Image (cartoon, helix red, strand yellow):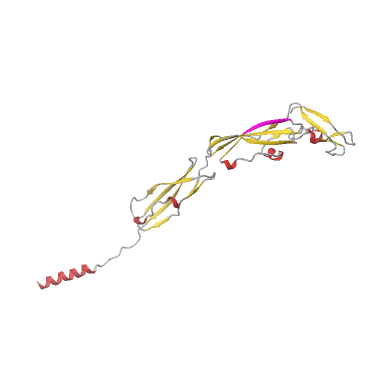
Amino acid sequence: MSPFAIENFNTSAQPNVLALLNNFGAASGNNIEDVLFDDSDNLTLSQVRASQSGGLIINCPMNLTVACASAIPAGATTPAAFLTQGGSASASRCRRRFSDGAPVGSVPCNYTITRTYMATDTRNNSSTCMQTITVHDLTPPTIMCPNSVSVPCYSLVPAPNTSLVTASDTCGGAVAVTFVGDSESNLGSSCNNVITRTYRATDVCGNTATCSQVITINDNLAPTFVVVARAIKLRRQHRARALRS
């Protein structure tokens, strides 16, 4: 930490200025102006001003990588928020502001933002630092297929229907659903045939996820006999002609 230059403008009735805790700002985040008071601990009367000959020193929060733009933390505008995010400053009493640069890279899938912080202390010393925030979406979308179904005949197998598939993306944006294909355990048969139907979801960053619907075909229906009246009548007529002859 750079050395402090102390200016004493104390106008209180108590001329002695105390160095509370005797740390003189040596602890991280402490400003010497906050630890020097007169005997009455009256901040308005105990006008001690402090500045660093080397200037104000600030350290930005660490660089970070997030999966979605929505996960980018809000810029810190208060000392508490700045410290919470991992930043530090050689003066606790300082104004902080930030600005975000234009995204660099492929938005919204893989890009960086440079966040610049500027702090100014009570003696108008100022300092800046930069934090790099990377957004890299490698998270696949979520997808849910229609429920499994059972049918008695191959002809009753429903056609693929992407509108019955539910899909969404954690980071937002459109998700495209496509039919991948059917895999049959007993190709083309209505007897104990299981079809595994697969759908795929693809988000705007090319991340994919699949789901499967199971369609069971099992023909357990007994056959039925159909008696055709005309055929019986024709057979009777043929028998009667044979007898007459």
Q: Residue at x 20, y 70 (%)?
A: 233
| 73 inside magenta stretch | no
Majority SS type along the magenta span: strand
Q: Nearer the viewer, residue 243 or 130?
A: 130
Using residue 89 as the reference point, say whether residue 111 is left or right of it.
left
Residue projecting furthest to the right:
13
Q: Count all numbered tags in the image, as a single digit.
A: 0
Q: Residue at x 82, y 29 (%)?
A: 7
Start-end of magenta stretch: 125-131
**Residue 128: quarter of image:** top right
**Residue 22: quarter of image:** top right
Q: Nearer the viewer, residue 226 or 55?
A: 55
The percent coordinates of residue 48 (x first, y second) are 82, 33
Q: Residue at x 12, y 72 (%)?
A: 243
Using residue 7 as the reference point, say whether residue 125 is left or right of it.
left
Using residue 169 as the reference point, say whether residue 43 is left or right of it.
right
Using residue 156 as the reference point, say whether residue 235 is left or right of it.
left
The C terminus sits in image quarter? bottom left
Residue projecting furthest to the left:
245
The percent coordinates of residue 172 (x first, y second) are 53, 45
The N terminus sits in image quarter? top right
Image vertical order of residue 126 relative to residue 182, above or below: above
Q: Nearer the viewer, residue 127 or 19?
A: 127
The percent coordinates of residue 59 (x first, y second) are 68, 32
The percent coordinates of residue 119 (x first, y second) are 70, 33
Q: Residue at x 70, y 30 (%)?
A: 127
